[in-house]
Image (cartoon, rainbow, N blue to C red):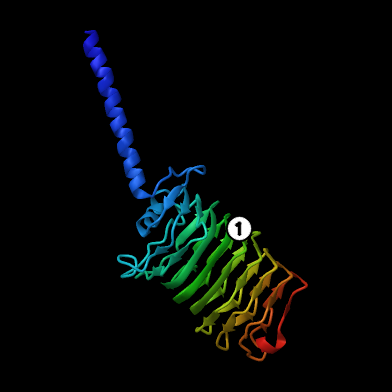
Amino acid sequence: MFKNVKNEYFYRRFVLIIMIVAFATISFAQFGGGDGTQGSPWLVNRPEHLNNVRDHLNGHFIQRDDIDLGVAPWNEGVGWDPIGTSADPFTGSYDGNGYVIRNLFINPQEEMRNSGLFAATSGAVIKNLGLLDVDHRLGGQRSGPLVGALGNSEVTDCYVTGTLTTGDANQMAGFVGWASGSQITNCWSDVEVSGDASWSGGMVGTFTGGSTITNCFSLGSITSTETARQNIGGLLGMNSGSTVINCYSRSQVTAPEGVNRIGGLIGRNMGGSVTNSYSTGRVSDHNGENQEGGLTGGDDNSNVTNSYWDTETSG
């Protein structure tokens, strides 16, 4: 009797060990190592690892090598499937560790509410990451190569280069489509943004909810092709009750006559604060009929301090 009990004990321990090893093997196969905690984040070394981030939206990750998404299946068809959704956003942390992700291609065949490397975040941290040669196409809402909808999150030391082209869209930009209650620090974009969009900018389309953007800049261009649009800016499409500090834009802002509120730095500054910032990019000139400005296109109850634009280069 004792022998049977003893054998049963060792048998159960053996099964338990096998299960633990199997689980660890599966987790390791998903990533290059780590366990997803802050102390031991999952290691992201390859496109497959990056794709698996979507299965652990509250996890912690660190990139350990440059990643090229210009390979099948991510460079064909609909391309990259954005991580997270409005209902189930990314809430963890992603540390690019100074590495880059190349050739992000997003080409949905139907309208998506949020679109980017990350579709939506909430309470997340994204840092030390570069996106190079992005090709982002979309007709929809809240589109940005890094994050479509950035909610109560922090983005630090990140940058984006490439193109963003949309059809009938709103809240799109070369970095983040929409940001609320968030902090963006030491970031930049050099993106050619074009499409029929309201609330579009070089960095952020709509900046709201007490957000702060500090030490950031935009290059590239923002081109609106639809007359019945509004709020187009070199850095931000619209700043609603949020703060801009030590930022600048050299982006060219172009829109047809009829687009309202076009600005070299901000399309519409509504109750926002701008300090130590400037713009030098060319801005469409329609003789002031549609509120164009070298710095802001429209300014409503806002506080602008020690900020300026270049009257020659802006036109």
Q: Residue 266, percent across and down? A: 64, 74
253 or 22: nearer the eye?
22
Residue at 32%, 36% (x, y): give it.
21
Residue 191 relative to residue 53: left or right: right
How many numbered discs sit on the rendered protein? Answer: 1
Determine which residue is flagged by label 1. Answer: 182
Identity of the residue furthest to the bottom in this view: 287
134 w.r.t. 284: above or below: above
Q: Position of residue 47 (x, y in %)?
A: 37, 59
Quadrant containing the C terminus in the rendered view: bottom right
Q: Residue at x 35, y 49 (%)?
A: 30
Task: Give left or right: position of 89 versus 290.
Answer: left
Q: Residue 264, relative to residue 107: is it above or below?
A: below
Image quadrant occupied by the N terminus: top left
| 51 and 58: which is toward the camera | 51
Q: Which residue is at 62% across, 64% downward?
A: 186
Q: Is residue 18 left or right of residue 94?
A: left
Residue extending furthest toward the right: 306
Which secondary structure, mark 1?
loop
Tell me if I can see residue 145 in this picture.
no
Task: Answer few, some or many: residues within 10 Å of disc 1's Cα (few below 14, many 20 plus, some between 14 and 19).
Answer: many
Q: Residue at x 65, y 76 (%)?
A: 265
User: Residue 9, percent across and down?
Assistant: 28, 18
In the foreground, 38 or 252: 38
